[in-house]
Amino acid sequence: MENIAFQGLIGLSLAMYLWLISAGLTIIFGVLRIVNFAHGSLFMVGAYLAYTFYGQMGLPFGLAVVLSLAGTGLLGYVMERGFLRRIYRIDEAYQLLLTFGFILILDDAVKIIWGGVFKIPPIPAFLDGAWPMFGRAFPVYNAFVIAVGLFVAVALWLIFEKTWWGRITRATASDREMASAIGVNVPRVFSAVFVFGAMLAALGGAIGTPVRVVAPGIGASMIIQAFIITVIGGLGNLKGAFFSSLIVGILSAYGTLFFPVFELFFIFVIMAVVLLIRPQGLFAR
């Protein structure tokens, strides 16, 4: 029983990584209506920038995370203003092709800049160590990741439900023509939302840097799980993304413990069942 409870904590920490990347993907789709395949690459860029600032330049870990968010947000701004803005009103196939092209470009870019060797810096001293949990040592860093994920969940609820910018964003997502008619600068909202989503992806990559291998291609594996989460929860639904992240993260942890060969199989089965029974997602309205 203690092993099962402990594995649940491991799954919860994994769920928070998935939540951070799927939250940004969900927000971008909910407002811009773009399925951004390159979102996983933004996760990867955030991880590499954090590695550079923290692991190579020796900056404090917190500052390195902030700088990685700023750098990835700037990249997101360039992507939205220079490329995505030109294809909002054309067929979705072109959107998929463009964002998939960014995956190839960014993967090669990190190989050119950082090389193809795996990177992993040490855990910050103030987050090193472990706490006794259910008869085993639970890493302090995993607890930190869980706390960050829960904080982001509360912060997003406050931003989108209690702030003026959140109301404008929800109005734009609901009816962009009507929002434009009442004076909302829709292109500016789109840019801000895309940058915000990119920074959420970068946050997931940055805080995972000391414990998860940083390597070219990590974004592709993360985006697959993020898409599974958004499908299960409902495209564009933040609450659905959060609870689906918990389902996928905890199920992955228990799958690793009991059925390591079939870990991903169970996740895809859940997605298939949801698509058959409730195609709009479990939490979609």
Image: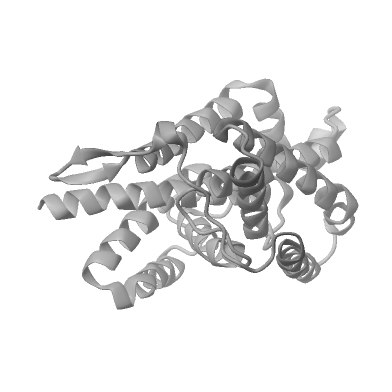
Determine whether, in the image, residue 160 is placed left or right of residue 107: left
Q: Residue furthest left?
A: 1
Q: Please identify the quarter of the rendering in which residue 126 is found.
A: top left
Q: Is 267 situated above or below 43?
A: below
Q: Is 187 situated above or below 63?
A: below
Name the residue located 76 percent from the left edge and 37 percent from the top edge. 192
Name the residue located 39 percent from the left edge and 71 percent from the top edge. 264
Give percent across and percent down for residue 111. 71, 66
Give percent across and percent down for residue 214. 56, 58
Q: Is 272 situated above or below 244?
A: below
Q: How many marks?
A: 0
Give percent across and percent down for residue 223. 57, 62
What scheme was used to colour the molecule?
Answer: one colour
Determine whether, in the image, residue 21 is placed left or right of residue 98: left
Determine whether, in the image, residue 166 is placed left or right of residue 74: left
Give percent across and percent down for residue 127. 40, 35
